[in-house]
Image (cartoon, helix red, strand yellow):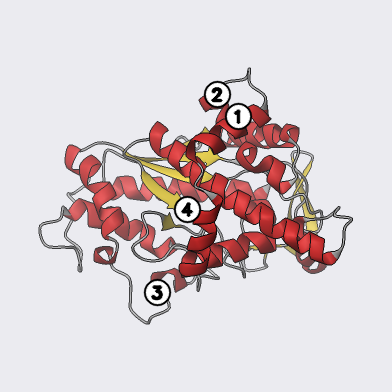
Amino acid sequence: MTSPARPLPGAPAGHPAGCAAVLAELLPYRRTLNSGHGDGEGDRDGDGDMDTPAAYPAQLRQLAAPVAAGAPLVFTLPGFPCKSPHPAKVLGHLPDEGERLALRFLDALCARIEAVHPPGARVVICSDGHVFSDLIHVPDRDIDAYADALRALIHDEGLTRLDVFDLRQVYGQRLSHDAKRALVHDRYAPALEDLRSLTRSDEPTRRLYQGITRFLAEDSVSFTGTRSAWQRDCRRRAYGVMQRSRAWGELIGEHHPGAIRLSIHPQPRGSVKFGIRLLDAPDVWMTPWHSCVLEHRDGRRELLHRADAERLGRLVFRQGRPSHFVAG
């Protein structure tokens, strides 16, 4: 029998100790703008103060109702959209070792949470490729193939604490992808001018805009215009991605009320979303779908762009497909 969760240092007075215990399982993997290799950097927020559950009242509030009710916890994680279209970053358009390790991490994290919250936990991966495909220049057929392979990987790995949610669950198969995107944007997206204003006044939003712009610029492999036109196009699409991201978040909230909100982007303290690091990477913005895995001689796995990983290791195949690199 699992013993009751014990109060943790820093838990707010009167707050259920179980909420703090659950949050303590997440804190070592918190993604911040200073996060890099998985050596505990995520425990700090760049101000020299160690994180404690009490520093995250938004997450404690989200946890309060299901913990008090003795109900299973549901976490929603937007991400796992599709592979980057840039061949120097990834091994192909299907999930590989990066996704496999990230999914296994999320399932294991739920198991650790179950040790302090016996009703258990699940992560709903809100695969958002179709939400953005026209903006990131990835064909919808590749996104379907990626999402289907992601579900198959979860099944084959026996990851019973994970689910996948995408636009097919929302609008079915009859509407076109363009029609589904228009419905999401028109109903949920913030006004462009409001988002531009927030980008100018709010530092986390500005950094998010810059990060997305950089990714879009790196992935623009077939742009034929001038450099200034290319830069304008990337900035325009970055705002579009941010609008759709917020719209997708609103839609997720409607379909998964009461869920605890995770994010693959860095999040400041006080945000309603909790940024989470999936794997080690030298860049805080790097994800398994923008990179591939290099396995070092000591067994450590790291996300790197393909062009960097293949200089350091040899390619390994899994079930006939390129999987990752192993250091020589």
Q: Nearer the viewer, mark 3 or mark 2?
A: 2
Image point (72%, 34%), residue name: 140
Viewer-side label of 4, 2 = 2
> Which is closer to the viewer, label 1 or label 4?
1
Badge 2 density bin: few <14, some 14–19, many ≥20, Cα 10 Å: some
Amino acid at circle 1: Lys
Residue at the farthest left position: 14
Q: Earlier in the sequence, mark 1 or mark 2?
A: 2
Label 4: few (<14), some or many (≥20) within 10 Å? some
Residue 26, percent across and down? 37, 57
User: How many discs mark residues in the rendered view?
Assistant: 4
In the rendered image, residue 296, in percent from the top left (x then y), is placed at: 67, 66
**Secondary structure type for disc 2:** helix
Residue type at the position of mark 3 = Arg
Tag on residue 44? 3
What residue is disc 2 on?
171
